[in-house]
């Protein structure tokens, strides 16, 4: 049985730990570039998955210059490493407006943009931008079917006409996130992506007809990535591809990214002859999904029977085959919020966890 995930120095690594495999991350970045036929400018990866300087730097080393993020801390991290173009895929409101504008002052070599889907929110950003001598670039967020954020087509004309009159803003594109698309059947998923793209394209044409300079289109996440990657007129925004997880591996196997993040856990108690308790509570792995929230490499680990804050009870054929302190490896169903459970990643090179990467943007605030 292949054990690529096992490390030789597990005894030196406290658990629970999130191991990341540098060579596999690099291969996944290459795979993402393959989808866009090597045109780096068509990739705008979302860093919500990794929240880490070093992973973003690996993407920059491959020529990727544009990024997307969801929090001010993630945007700041990208400014710190000198990313060229950063889109905050969120409409900043309240104190976030000031925090976002501070980034443009603090990191003048990074071009920051944000989303808007509401005239009042846009006006607040415009007014505060003018007050400090900035003109903020924005994308209009379009509701392409997810019904979470974004303006619907019926209200788009009024919004962009308002925006065009705001001196503190410069409209540079339209954005759509189709996170509602997650059908396992790739044919159905392709049809759904086509509908979402159609909505974004309609919005683009409506706005472009009123602006002389060319606008950009940003669309998609990981499930829709291969379909939008074939379009030469959009920037694609996958994020999970750098680490992957078992949820995406099972549902979108055709993307063929490699698992590059694995949880190390240990047996902390032998409950009875059929059950073990591990140190993998729901403070250590994303818990928004139903069980199983992790998939174990060891085939002896059966059904998850109970999970609490610091404990995970699993069923096994014979608990006498295990000892207290045994190391076990598993992959989370959803890697993005799992990363946010950890202050640092244990980096595996070869079969050694010999480095740590700080998850800087795990916090809501770094400096700004």
Image (tube, rainbow, N blue to C red):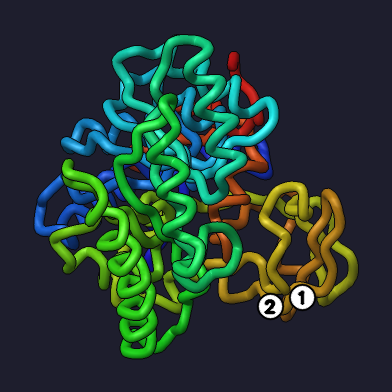
Decide which of 99, 288 is in the foreground and name it: 99
| Label 1 CA crowd tier, 10 Å (few <14, some 14–19, many 20+) | many
Residue 5 in view: no
Question: Dot 1 corresponds to which residue?
Answer: 315
Residue 360 position, x and y percent, is 55, 26
**Residue 188: percent from left, percent from top:** 37, 89
CA separation in Å, label 1 and label 2: 5 Å
User: What residue sits 57% from the left and 58% below the top?
Assistant: 149
Q: Describe residue 94's horizontal placement relative to residue 273 as left or right.
A: left
Q: Position of residue 263 (x, y in %)?
A: 58, 51
Q: Is residue 193 left or right of residue 209?
A: right
Disc 1 to disc 2: CB gap under 8 Å: yes
Q: Which residue is mark 2?
A: 302
Q: State the residue in front, 195 or 71.
A: 195
Q: Is residue 149 above or below residue 352?
A: below
* Left or right of residue 191: residue 73: right
Q: Residue at x 82, y 71 (%)?
A: 275
Tag 2's secondary structure?
A: loop
Quarter of the figure with the N terminus? bottom left
Q: Is residue 191 above or below residue 286?
A: below
Identify which residue, 25 or 271, lies in the foreground: 25
């Amino acid at each position: 049985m292949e054990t690529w995930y096992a490390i030789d120095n597990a005894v030196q690594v406290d658990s629970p730990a999130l191991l990341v495999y540098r060579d596999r991350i690099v291969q996944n970045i290459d795979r993402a570039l393959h989808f866009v036929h090597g045109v780096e400018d068509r990739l705008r990866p979302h860093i919500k998955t990794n929240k880490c300087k070093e992973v973003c730097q690996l993407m920059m080393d491959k020529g990727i210059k544009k990024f997307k993020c969801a929090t001010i801390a993630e945007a700041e991290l990208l400014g710190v490493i000198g990313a060229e173009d950063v889109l905050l895929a969120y409409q900043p409101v309240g104190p976030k407006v000031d925090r976002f504008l501070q980034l443009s002052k603090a990191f003048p070599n990074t071009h920051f943009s944000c989303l808007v889907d509401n005239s009042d929110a846009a006006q607040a950003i415009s007014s505060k931008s003018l007050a400090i001598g900035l003109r903020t670039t924005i994308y209009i967020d379009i509701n392409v079917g997810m019904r979470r954020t974004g303006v619907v087509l019926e209200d788009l004309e009024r919004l962009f006409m308002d925006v065009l009159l705001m001196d503190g803003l410069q409209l540079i594109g339209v954005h759509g996130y189709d996170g509602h698309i997650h059908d396992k059947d790739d044919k159905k998923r392709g049809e759904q992506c086509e509908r979402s793209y159609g909505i974004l394209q309609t919005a683009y044409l409506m706005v472009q007809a009123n602006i002389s300079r060319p606008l950009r289109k940003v669309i998609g996440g990981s499930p829709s990535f291969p379909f939008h990657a074939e379009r030469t007129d959009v920037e694609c925004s996958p994020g999970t591809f750098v680490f992957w997880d078992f949820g995406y591996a099972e549902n979108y196997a055709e993307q063929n990214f490699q698992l590059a993040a694995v949880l190390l856990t240990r047996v902390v108690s032998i409950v009875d002859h059929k059950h073990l308790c591990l140190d993998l509570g729901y403070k250590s792995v994303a818990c928004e999904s139903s069980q199983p929230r992790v998939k174990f490499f060891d085939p002896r680990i059966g059904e998850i029977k109970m999970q609490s804050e610091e404990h995970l009870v699993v069923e096994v054929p014979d608990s006498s085959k295990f000892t207290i302190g045994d190391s076990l490896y598993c992959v989370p169903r959803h890697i993005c919020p799992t990363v946010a459970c950890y202050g640092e990643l244990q980096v595996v090179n070869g079969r050694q966890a010999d480095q740590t990467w700080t998850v800087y943007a795990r916090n809501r605030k770094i400096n700004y």
